[in-house]
Each structure stands twice: as C-alpha cells, then as structure tokens.
Image (tube, rainbow, N blue to C red):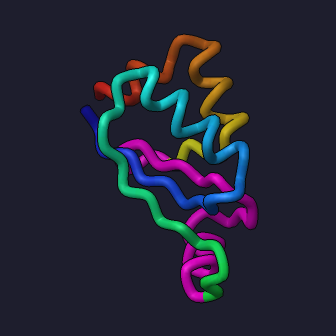
Amino acid sequence: MNKVRMYRTRSCPYCRRAEKLLKKHGVKKMHVIDVAGNKKLWAAMEKETRRNTVPQIFIGDVHVGGYDDLAALDRKGKLDKLLKS
C-alpha cells in the first residue's frame, strides 16, 4: 500500500472526514503533519501544494488535494487503485 501523508489541523472537520475515509479503505497508518499554529509548517505546506487549506493529502508521490478531491476519487472508484499502486 502506498504511503499516505496529510497536512491537517485537529479542529478541521474535513481533516477528520479524510482520515475516516482513508481508514475505511484500509489505511492503517499515515504520516500526519499538524500545521495548526505553526507558520513554518503551514508555509511549507503552501509551497509544496500551492494551496492554503487543510487537509492536503498525498498518496505516494501524488498530491490528491483536499477532502473533496479525495472523496471524488472514491466516488469514481479510483481511490483504491491509487492506494494500492
């Protein structure tokens, strides 16, 4: 299974939804980077993703985007394939 990395904050409901969806698809472990209150980590996230919202999710080397993007992959039946590729 591909490694999953996610930038998030603890108070973000979309971050929790993303974690729940990933766990539903068998992701047992992910690298979580909590950017709340950390300007350096937030700036690093923005530089890497060119976005300024959380969550920002990577599966392997692929930047999936946020929760809406992750959910769209799931609806199209492409999430499992990306997780297992």
- In screen coordinates, is 16 left or right of 2? right
> Residue 74 at x, y = what percent?
57, 19
Residue 8 image-quadrant placement: bottom right
Most distant residue in the left direction = 1
Number of marks in picture: 0
Residue 69 image-quadrant placement: top right
Most distant residue in the bottom direction = 40
In the rendered view, tell whether residue 46 sits above or below residue 73. below
Quadrant position of the N terminus in the picture: top left
Nearer to the camera, 85 or 28: 28
Within the magenta stretch, is there residue 21?
no
Most distant residue in the front direction = 11
User: Which residue sits at x=53%, y=67%?
Assistant: 34
User: Which residue sits at x=61%, y=63%?
Assistant: 49
> Residue 24 at x, y = what percent?
45, 21
Nearer to the camera, 75 or 32: 32
User: Which residue sits at x=71%, y=53%?
Assistant: 12
Nearer to the camera, 59 or 12: 12
> Residue 15 at x, y = what percent?
63, 47
Residue 44 image-quadrant placement: bottom right
Quadrant position of the C terminus in the picture: top left
Within the magenta stretch, is there residue 52?
yes
In the rendered view, tell whether residue 55 sits above or below residue 42. above
In the rendered view, tell whether residue 84 sits above or below residue 56. above
User: Which residue sits at x=53%, y=49%?
Assistant: 57
> Residue 84 at x, y = what percent?
30, 25
The magenta stretch spans which residues?
40-62
